[in-house]
Image (cartoon, rainbow, N blue to C red):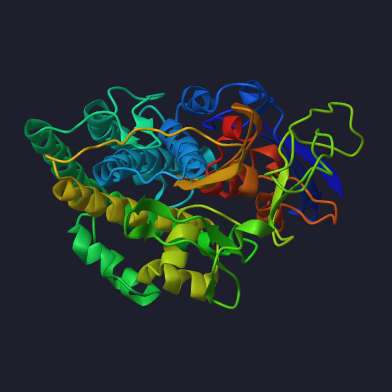
Amino acid sequence: MTRIAVGPFNRVEGDLEVRLDIADGRVARAEVTAPLYRGFEQILEGRPPLDALVIAPRICGICSVSQSVAAAAALRAAMALDAAPNGLLATNIAHAAENAADHLTHFYVFFMPDFAREAYAAQAWHAPATERFKATHGSAAREALPARARLLEIMGVIAGKWPHSLAFQPGGTTRAIELGERIRLTSIAAAFRGFLERVVFADRLENVLALSSAHELDRWRDGRGGDFAHFLRIADALALADLGKGTGRLMSFGAYHDQEGAHFRAGVLSSSAQVAPLPLGQITEDVSHAWMRDTSLDPAESATVPDADKPNAYSWCKAPRLAGQPVEVGALARQAIDGQSLIAALVAESGSNVRNRVIARLIETARLAVAIESWVKALRLNEPFCVNARDISDGHSVGLVEAARGSLGHWLAVHHGKIERYQIIAPTSWNFSPRDADGVAGPLEQALVGTEVGSAGARAVGVQHVVRSFDPCMVCTAH
């Protein structure tokens, strides 16, 4: 058995290192390391609670709105406050725009360029994939990036700027949308739909979202243009459904809340194929292999105390667990748990894998485009967008949201008007966690086992595909 180290990975937000034990040309064991420590949780301690709205979003410039919304949700719960319905709708529009933009970035900038690598030069599909997706040279990015930029104009209308806006508050959003601005939002949403229908899917979104089985997806793909069909043909040629198999347990905190509940429901999905309620009280953070001192397994009671010399530790990332088990989070989990017909069928057939994770992101993007249109129409322009904040009593609260990469939670403890503790479990913390006290590997560590490396060693494209299918954002991981 030989050991190789892979990293840092390009096209990844932050640093990532992976150590692989190789036997017979395949990964036998993996250790995933987050080598960067940032300390945002410590920065927040001792500050007024509302400072979280300023500091927490600066954890990351990619998912800034997700961090803002989670902080606002934790503060709203601490205030026992009901936000203005318009504020919830405006938040959903902006949050969905950020997540959809993230999905586009992942597909066109992070994931697809790997198929233009020389390792695939002998494949019949390599030349068109290179022309379309090669990093900095492919034609796809020249279409996708302007569409992404136009989508993010939504932030200017709702939040004034992006990233790190203060528009997202416990009581709603600070800017009231006027009629002219709603017309502009409608225009942006229509342009985004047009890009998806023309470039990504080469079909109406409603037709794509009506697909309900792998067989229907294959029939729809055959002979069709569009980048989604292009990916599906490559995925079948490389058997990506057999690569990067997940743990079998999926989790979602529920996404895009309004007065009627979550647009994508919360829950847990295991190999039984039954969606169970989310057992929030069973979330723990194990630090046995993290450069952190033991405080409490409960994120509501734990503290962030670095210990860079800790024996047997190999990551700044803690090991979040649900009922003592690792779980995978992300678009695949959200859509499977919400019962989206195609994703539920694919998960039932082949589980969590590289192909299904990418498909879920694109299907979710289509659903978000439709949802943004409906939320813009639902705004009541003559009603408030924000209600006043209330004083915060001593105690604990939590804010749960879904970022593009998966479940994001902010645990807040207030004492004498100051933040006593602030704990954040980010999506990459779930997916890229190290082993726990029982030696159970995290989701990516498990998914890498069995990946063929051959003679390519650290340059093996299979390893790249598995890692990128989870879309790591390492700066969000070690706060």
Q: Position of residue 348 (x, y in %)?
A: 50, 75
Asked if residue 278 lies left or right of residue 156, the reply is right
Asked if residue 347 lies left or right of residue 1, the reply is left
Furthest toward the right, the residue is: 311
Residue at position x 70%, y 54% in the image: 321
Q: Position of residue 120 (x, y in %)?
A: 50, 46
Q: How many marks?
A: 0
Residue at position x 80%, y 34% in the image: 292
Is residue 318 among what the camera can see? yes
Is residue 230 among what the camera can see? no
Residue at position x 72%, y 56% in the image: 449
Q: Position of residue 219 (x, y in %)?
A: 29, 72
Q: Position of residue 465 (x, y in %)?
A: 55, 47
Q: Nearer the viewer, residue 462 or 369?
A: 369
Q: Nearer the viewer, residue 302 or 464?
A: 302
Residue at position x 44%, y 31% in the image: 64
Q: Within the image, what quadrant is residue 131 found in? A: top left
Which quadrant would the C terminus be assigned to in this image?
top right
Q: Within the image, what quadrant is residue 16 found in? A: top right
**Residue 468 in the image: above or below residue 42:** below
Q: Nearer the viewer, residue 233 or 290?
A: 290
